[in-house]
Amino acid sequence: MSAENRFVTLLKNGAVRGPLLWSVVGRFPLYLVTLALVVLTTSRGTDYGSAGLLLAAYTLGGAVLAPVVARRVDVHGQPPLLLVTGVVHPVALICLVRASPDAEGVQLACAVVAGATIPPVSGCIRSLWTALPDGREAGFSLEAVLSEVFVIGGPLLLSAVLFWGSPGTALVIGGLLAGAGAIGLATTRASRAWRAEPTERDLLGALRSPGLVWLLAVLACCAVSMGVFNLVLPAFAADHGSADSVGLIFGAWGVGGVIGGVWYGNRRQHGPAERTFTIGLLALAVATALPLLAWDNWSMGVALAIGGLAIAPVTAVEYELVARTAPAGTVTEAFTWVITVNVIGSAVGASVGGLLISGYGTWAAFVAAIAALLLGTALAFAARHRFVAAGPSPDEPSVPPVAAALSQD
C-alpha cells in the first residue's frame, strides 16, 4: 500500500466499506447519548446531582461489564453479541425515557442496563482491522481519526435533534443508531467470518499479558490528563468571558486531532511502534503545556488545535500496540479494556481537576494534566521492551477466514 493514498486504497476495498460504514453508524451517537442523558434529566426539573448519578450509572455499567461482553465476543464470535446488545441497548434507553421522572430507581436500572449493553462495535471493528491482510496501520489510523470525528459530531448531532425535538427524542435516536450499527455490522461477511484464535480461557483473560497491563497503565495516565481537561476547559471558558465558548474550544481540539490523524495515516512508517509511541507521548505532553500560555478563549482554541495534532497519531500507535500485546484469542477484550481504562482514568482526572480548580485555579489543573502525561511517557519508556511484537505480525494475519473476507475484491 503506497504511502500517498493509504486511506483511499483502504476504502476502495469493497469488503471493508460495509463494516466501516456500520461501525460509524453505531458509534456516532456515543457522545450524543451521554450528553442527552444529562439534558433529559435536567429538563425534567431534576438537579445536576441526580443527573450526574444517572450518567455515572450509565458510564460505570459500560466500564464494568464491557470487558465481560467483549470476552464473550472472543468466545462466541461477533454476530451473537452484536445482535443481542443491538436490541437491548436501545430498548433500555427507550424505557429510561418512558419512565416517570419520579421513578429514580427505575431510571437508574435502565441506565445501568443501557450502559452495560453498549454494542461492542469499537472492539469488533478494531479486531477486524487487526486481521486485515494489508493496510492494518491505515485501518488503525482511520480509527484514530474517527475517534476525533465522533467527539465533534456527537454533540453537533445532539444540537440538531434538540433544535427540532426533545432530549428524550435525542436519546431514543442515539440508541436506535447504536443498535442499527451493531446489527448492520453483524450482518457483514467480515463480521460473520471473524473468529478468535483458540486459546486457554482463564479468569485474567487479556490481562494475563504483562505488556498489555503496562500499556493500560500508560493509557490510564493519558486518560487522567484528558479527564482534567474535560473539567478545566469549561472552567477556563467561564473565567474568560463566556461559558458558551467551550463547545468551540473542544471543537478546535478535535479538528487538530483529525488533521494530525490524516497526516499520520498517509505517511510511511519509520522505526518501531514502541519508540514512536514514547516519542508521541512526549510530544503530546509538551503540546499540553500550550494552554498555559492562553489568555482568552480564542487563544485557547488555537493552543488546543495545535496540541490536538499529536492525539490521533498517538492513538493510532496505541491501537497497534494493543493488537501486539493482546494474548491470542483475546483481541476484542483487550481493545475493550482500553475503553474501560479511559473511562476510569477520565473520572479520576475530572475529580482531581475539580479539586485543583477550586483550590488553586485553572493553571494548577493544566499543570496536573501535563504531569499525568509525563508520567505516562516515563512508564512507556520503561516498559518499551514489553511492547515488542507479542502478537501476530501485520504480515501474518492471525484469522485466515476473516482475512479472506477482507481481501480486496
Image (cartoon, grey):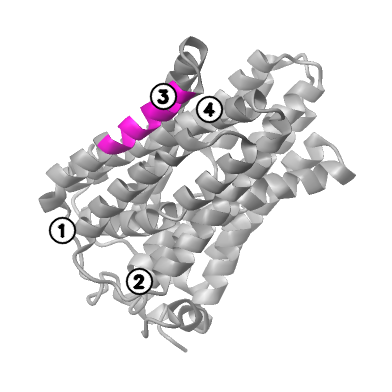
Q: Determine contact: label 2, label 3, CB under 8 Å.
A: no
Residue under label 4: 232
Labels 1, 3: front one: 3
Q: Earlier in the sequence, mark 1 or mark 4?
A: 4
Q: Report which quarter residue 199 is drawn in.
A: bottom left
Q: Which mark is residue 390?
A: 1
Where residue 182 sits: x, y (%)? 57, 56
Prevailing SS of the magenta stretch: helix
Other residues around mark 4 within 10 Å, as few (<14) / some (14–19) / many (≥20): many
* Residue 27 visible, this angle: no
Secondary structure under tag 4 reads: helix
Residue 368: within the magenta?
yes
Residue under label 3: 348
Q: Earlier in the sequence, mark 2 or mark 3?
A: 2
Left or right: 14 as drawn, with respect to 65 = right
Residue under label 2: 136
Secondary structure under tag 3 reads: helix
**Residue found at the very far top of the displayed protein:** 359
For marks 4 and 2, give the CA distance. Answer: 36 Å
The amino acid on which the numbered mark 3 sits, given as a three-letter code, is: Val
Residue at horizontal 72 percent and vertical 48 percent from the top = 156
The amino acid on which the numbered mark 2 sits, given as a three-letter code, is: Arg
Residue 386: within the magenta?
no
Labels 2, 3: front one: 3
**Which quadrant of the figure contains the N terminus?**
bottom left
Is 114 situated above or below 79?
A: above
